[in-house]
Structures are given as C-alpha cells and as structure tokens.
Image: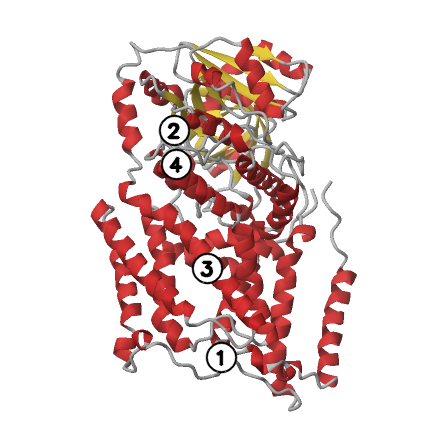
Amino acid sequence: MPPNPISPWAWGFLCLSLAVFIIALLSLNLSWFQNLPTYLNPQLTRDLPESLQFPDEPSKLLQPLLAATALLLLLTVLPHHPVSHLIVLIFLLIYGFRYFIWRLFALNSGHWISLAFSIIFLLAESLYVLSLLVQFYPTLVFDPQRRSRQADKQEDILHEFSPSVAIWIPIYNEDPRIIRRTILACQLINYDNKEIYVLDDGHRPIIQVIAEELNVHYLSRPDNTHRKAGNLNYALAHTESDLIAVFDCDFLPFHNFLQRTVGFFIDDDIALVQTPQHYYNSDFHNRNLGLDYVLPNDMDYFFHYIQPLRDQFNSVICCGTSYVARRSALEEVGGYYTDCIVEDFQTGTKLLLNRWRVVYLNEVLSIGEVPRHFSEYLQQRLRWMQGNIQLYCSGEKLPIWSQRLTTWQRLFYFSLLIYCLTPLMRAVYILFPLLSFLFGFTLIAAPPVEYLHYGLPFVLLIYGATSWLAYKHYFLYWTEVYESIMCWPSLHRLVQVLLNPFGHFGSLVTAKGELDNRKRFNWHLSWPFVAYLILFSLGFCLRYLAPLLSPNFVRSPFEGEGLMIIWNFYNAMLMLVCLFACIDQPIRRQFERYPYQTVACLEVDGRKLWGVTQDLSEGGASFVLRNERDLQLIYGQAELVLLREELRIPVNVLRISRKAINGHRQIGLEFKIPDKAAEQMLIRLLYVDSGLWWHQVRRTSALDAFLLLIRSALNPHALLTRYRDG
C-alpha cells in the first residue's frame, strides 16, 4: 500500500512555523554569528612557504587553470590510446600532488576543534581521491574490446566444441508472468545442447504447471536453507552438465548468449564467464527526474569500465546473473558460498583463491529489470553492501590478503574496501561544509584566489578527465548524487553490519514488477535532503539577508568563507536533485513500452487498414492509421499484422486518442496472445534481438551530463507533476 499523501494543512503549518521562527530571530536581536569565538579561525593573513607563493600577475595566476581547461578541450577530440591516457594521468598526478601539498598549508589551526574538523575533511578528500587513483591508473592497459575479439574467433569452432549447458533460473516469489517470459527467452537461445531448469524456492504449484507447459525441468528443494546459494547448490547436486548458465528470473538472455560465451571454456583454467547486467527499464532516479533514455544507468560505470578493467588482472566480480560457469570448478571449491547474505561475489572469490580464472565479456547479452522504486533500490544496494563487507569479515574462509592472490588482485580488494567506506566520506562532504558555514569557521583556510590557483584546476581535471578515461561511462558529479542518496541509509546499515556482520537486516529479495497508482514522496528516506536545504537556507538568510533587514545583525566574516559558500551551494544543488530523485512517480503499466515503429495492418471485418506502430509492449501497441478516414471503421475486436515480422495478433481496440499528434490520432490496442509461438515472437522483437537501439549502452559527454544535473536541480518535475487517480 502506498503511503497516504501529507495533508495540505500539515504543509501550511510547517511553512507558518518557519516564518514565525525567522521573525522570532529578528525580534530577539540574535547576533550569534558575531558572538562565536573568533579563535576558531586562523589569522586573516597567513604566509605560504616560498615554494607555494602564487604569482600576483593575473596571467601567471591563471596558468594552471588555463592549462587544465585546454587539456579538457583537447580530450573532446583526443583518441583513446595508452600514450594519451598516460599524458592525462600524468597531468592528474601533478595537479593532485600540488593540490594536496597546498591543502596541508591550508588547514585551520586556529583552535583544536577547527583543526580536527579541517584534518578530518582533508583525510576524507585524500581517501576519496586515493580510491579514484586505484580505479583509473590501471586504465593504461584498458582494452574494452579484447574479449569481444576473442569471442569472434571462438564462435567459428562451436560446431566442434559443444559442451552441455544447464540453464538455471532461480526464483522465489516473483510474478509467474515474469518467470514465464524468462523461460521463453531462454528457449530462444541459439544453442542445441542445452537444458532449462526452474529452481523454485517458493514451492508454488503454479510455477510447476508453467514449467510443464513449456517443457522445461522443475526443481524445488525441501527447505530454503542458505537462500539463493542453497538453491543453486541443490541444483548443482541434482543436475548434470558441463557448463551452467544462471539468469535471475527477471533477466532475458539474447539469442546469441551461449554462442558468445561458451567458446571461452576451451581454455581449461577458465571457471566462469561474466557478462554485463543491462536493464530494459530506467532506474528510479532517471525515471523520477525525467531522464529516461538520456543518462546512463548508475551501474553502467561498473559493468562497462570497472569490470573490463579488472578482467585485465583476473579480478572480475561474479554478479549473480548472466554468467556461465564450469561445473567442475564449482564442485572443486565446494559449490556456492553460503555464509554470506549474497553468494555471487564470494563464490567468484573462492574460484580466484583456487587459481581459477574468471573472464569478463563486455557485451550486453541479456537484459533485466532494475528496481522500480526508491525503497526497493535502496534495499537491494544495502544488501549488496552488506555482502561486500561480509567478505572482509570471513577470515580464513576467504583469505583475500594471502599470497594465493596476486598483488593486483589484493589491490582491487583494497579498493573495494575503501568503496565500502564511501558513506562516511560522503557524510563528511555534506555535513562539514554546512557546519562550517552555520558556525562561521573555515575548513580550508585560504582566500578564493589561492583556490583558483591550486584547487580549481585539479577539481576541473578530476571531474572531466575521469569521464574521458572511463570512456564516458562515469561522471563524478552524478556519482556524488548516487552516493548522497545512499549516504544516510548506508551509514545506518554500515553500523549494523560492523556490530553484527552476519546478521539479517532489511529485505533479502528484491521486489520485481510492482505497480503503484500514486506518487510516493518517501519522506522517511528523503528527510535528510529537506533538512539540509532548510538549514542552509536559514543560515544563508541569517548571515546575508538579516543584516539588510535589521542593523542589529552584524555579519562576522571569516577566511575561507567564499569557498564554504560555493561548496554549500554545490551541495544544495546535489540535495535538490536527490530530493527530486526520491519522489517516485506512479507506475501504472504492467508492461514496459518500447518505441518499436514498423509498418502494420489492422484487419477489421475483412478490411485492411494500413498504418504504423508507434510503440509496442508485451500487452499491446499504439497504432497510427495512414488514412484518418478509416478511424470510423475501427471498433471492438481486430487483428494486428506486423508484415516484416510475419506476426499476427488478435487485439481489442481500447481507445482512440482525442488529440492528434503530428496530425494523427493514436489507437490503443490490447493484445490477446493466441499461442506460445506468437508470445515468443513478441519477446524476441522486444527483448531478445541484440540490435534494438533502446537496449544499447547509453553515452553522453561530461558537459552534457553536468547540464543535465543543473536542469534536474532547477526543474522540479518529480515534485510538481500531478496525476489523476487511477
């Protein structure tokens, strides 16, 4: 059940309370800014070491900034090559080194309290940049197409090398419609020597009926011990095949999935081939912000940069779906790992510890469903985070710091450990500038001109160059949005997990295919963003507007104030985007619509009415007639014929739009799928064909991504859009 909307009277009371509070501050002659202890700040004048003295001439002062800007402009035309990557990395290293040397001399040493805040802030910056360093310096050997070239060569020998493959679909309590769709997609895979198994941990008779109807194997174990890992281990003991392909029940493999992956197992030391997770629906923040089909998914960076990069060092992470594994390798390591809340990452680690190789093929070969609502997304990511932390608490069961792993493999595990601490670093980035601004002490004891010379060039480079190094799969400012959204729930879960690493917290299964007729504001999750915006707005009014209204207010300036106000404005923009992203829009369609346009014919009582489909889904289509005069002939039941696809589907005419779009009125059609063949053909058209443009990985430039961020902050689409009840 969606939460009840907040009453307008409650909103009115909140606004009235804020107004009374501000008036009370004015009438009480509150000059608390002026009364703060000035010794929290250093002297307004301080001397830098001679080596860090910046020039007085504007031309020399701006040289680092101009050089960084020139490099970013050059990156728009510079091809990707190890030499060009090396040049960019050298620039990043030089600018980063000079920035952090300067930061050591920009600490606020006016008081031990301000010094502590300043040092913690610097440590958070350093740790964050260190994590980026580990991720981007191996880019010198980054080759995202290496495995694709290998797969091309291996496809030619599949007629000689054709090991048996068991396709597993582990399920729990998901919608039978979703499970049926995945089974049909698996049957469309072009590979003869395969068997399909539905692994039902929900013990539902309806699933067994579907399996029998579609002529696939059904397995249901007597208990649910160890969740998904136990389910997979039960299947491991009750099936026979050389290889195992695993798909979550909401993932649909493309027809060439096994053709592209099986060939790797010619090499006897390869245990597992992982492919990317790609999604047919927009993630919740893109959908809520109105950025569908524009901005890449938040996991795009991981699946199309981090994973191919890790593949260079045999450090690929198993991701739980869309992979093929060698049965003998799994049996050698004792099957799937059962001691953690998730099984995939830990099982892949067991394989690496036993000297097996895990390969990553950077090709979208399947498509699935991303969580539709903020709360579902949150529970999924918190579960992943707990699984990651549990890995580091597994001791001798998973000795990741031992010599059984290479130096690079251990370095990647160290990088992931830093990533687990991201909520702490993000909390510092959000709270410390706000506290600095509200209480009038600085975190960076330097005037803006120094930051212009040392800080801004490095910031521009790290925001722009990292996007280029990651082939436009990564945008640091959008990463900051995602991290801010996850920050406070992750901190809470982080504390829980550190106190009890192997406890059960939150949901263990991600809900799929859920509908919701109402807008969800998610105040229980988004209130930190509202609180930040209120506190910053009040602080800004009291510091800068109140002195204009009353002479009793005297503003007490402090060194570094300019930097703190800029940082807080940037954070406020991020908080606005986070707030709007957390407002879930209604999901009323059971089936995703895709802009599939093809010539079609609507047959009504023997008449053929020609037109074009505007969009297509599993449940229906939007159809436009070539001749508007034929509209009067359309009623009740008809048959839609897609000529190029040779597909006939009986339909019900649901509605004819009142308003014309581009001179044509759209006809809403509901499908009545006649048989399994038509159902499979429709699935192939919408999901299984790998060339469909709406299934391709989305790219955009760093500048466009930043403009989208500004647009999202200034355009409260999610907040203001109203929907009729339905």
Relative to the observer, which residue lies in front, 250 or 226? 226
Say above or below: 591 vs 604: below
Say above or below: 628 vs 6: above
Look at the numbered discs 4 and 2 and tell me whether their residues touch, using CB distance below 8 Å: no
Mark 2 and mark 3 lie on one chain; the one further toward the N terminus is: 3
Residue type for callout 4: Gln
Mark 2 and mark 1 lie on one chain; the one further toward the N terminus is: 1
Say above or below: 515 vs 541: above
Mark 3 and mark 1 lie on one chain; the one further toward the N terminus is: 3
Give the Cα distance between marks 3 and 1. Answer: 20 Å
Q: Which residue is mark 2?
A: 690
Q: Secondary structure at mark 3?
A: helix
Residue visible at 40% across and 41% down in the picture: 411
- Report the coloring of the rendering: secondary structure
Q: Residues within 10 Å of mark 4 (few under 14, many from 20)?
A: some
Residue type for callout 1: Glu
Question: What percent of the width, then of the height, locates residue 405?
Answer: 39, 32
Give the Cα distance between marks 4 and 2. Answer: 33 Å
Q: Which residue is mark 1?
A: 559
Determine if residue 632 is in view: yes
Q: Is residue 293 left or right of residue 378?
A: left
Question: What percent of the width, then of the height, locates residue 504?
Answer: 67, 35
Q: Which residue is mark 4?
A: 409
Residue type for callout 3: Glu
In this rendering, the label closer to the viewer, 4 or 3:
4
Look at the numbered discs 2 and 1 and tell me whether their residues touch, using CB distance below 8 Å: no
Q: Secondary structure at mark 2?
A: loop
Relative to the observer, which residue lies in front, 264 or 337? 337
Look at the numbered discs 4 and 3 and tell me whether their residues touch, using CB distance below 8 Å: no
Mark 4 and mark 1 lie on one chain; the one further toward the N terminus is: 4
Q: Which residue is mark 3?
A: 125
Please state, as top left, top right, bottom left or bottom right, where the C terminus lies in the image: top right
